[in-house]
Amino acid sequence: MIITRATEYAIRAILYMSRQPVGEIIYKKDICKAQDITPAFLTKIFQPLIKEGIVGSQRGVGGGFYLAKNPVEITLLDIINSQEGPVYLNQCLIAEGSCEREFFCPTHGAWAEIRNEFMTTLSRYNFASLAAKQGRLEAKSPSASIK
């Protein structure tokens, strides 16, 4: 599985927003500039994030985007699910009983275990800890600063 560019950019945008003061409205142009994302693409990737209640938007003068949840409550799994939909890894995991081989296939259980561990790992990474880690990395190497 390779995540889409939309998911990668959504992760970068949420990470950028997580490093701003809580509750602050962040201008679209600032996110685009900092993350090298076109305004149209940012709007596209934010639509599912707004629908999921992760990002909020404010229209008008002084409008922009803000995190609707605390960064500690937003995980990598949340962003991937909002952009890609549920992670299944294999067709046989989409719905119980959808695979006629699930009861005698030796890999069905392996796929289920791998999927569960993958989702658990993605759930452990929240954006508060990722933002803190980025800050520590930047402090160690100011010339290699990641936006």
Image (spheres, rainbow, N blue to C red):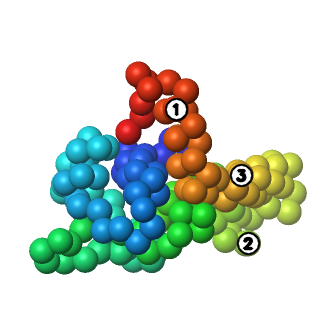
For the N terminus, give its image quadrant.
top right
User: Of label 2 and label 1, which has the lower sequence position?
Assistant: 2
Q: Position of residue 97 (x, y in %)?
A: 73, 72
Q: How packed is label 3: few (under 14 Cα within 10 Å), some, or many (20 or more)?
A: few
For the C terminus, give its image quadrant.
top left
User: Of label 2 and label 3, which has the lower sequence position?
Assistant: 2
Nearest to the observer: residue 68 or residue 121 = 68
Q: Are marks 3 and 1 in contact (CB under 8 Å)?
A: no
Q: Are marks 2 and 3 in contact (CB under 8 Å)?
A: no
Q: Which residue is mark 2?
A: 97
Which element is circle 2 on?
loop
Residue located 42% across and 34% down the image: 146
**Which kind of residue does numbered mark 2 sit on?**
Gly
What's the distance in space between the residues labelled 2 and 3, CA to CA? Answer: 26 Å
Residue located 41% across and 57% down the image: 20
Which element is circle 1 on?
helix
Q: Which residue is mark 1?
A: 139
Q: Position of residue 64 (x, y in %)?
A: 24, 68
What's the distance in space between the residues labelled 2 and 1, CA to CA? Answer: 51 Å
Which element is circle 3 on?
helix
Q: Which residue is mark 3?
A: 121
**Which kind of residue does numbered mark 3 sit on?**
Thr
Residue 36, quarter of the rendered image: top left
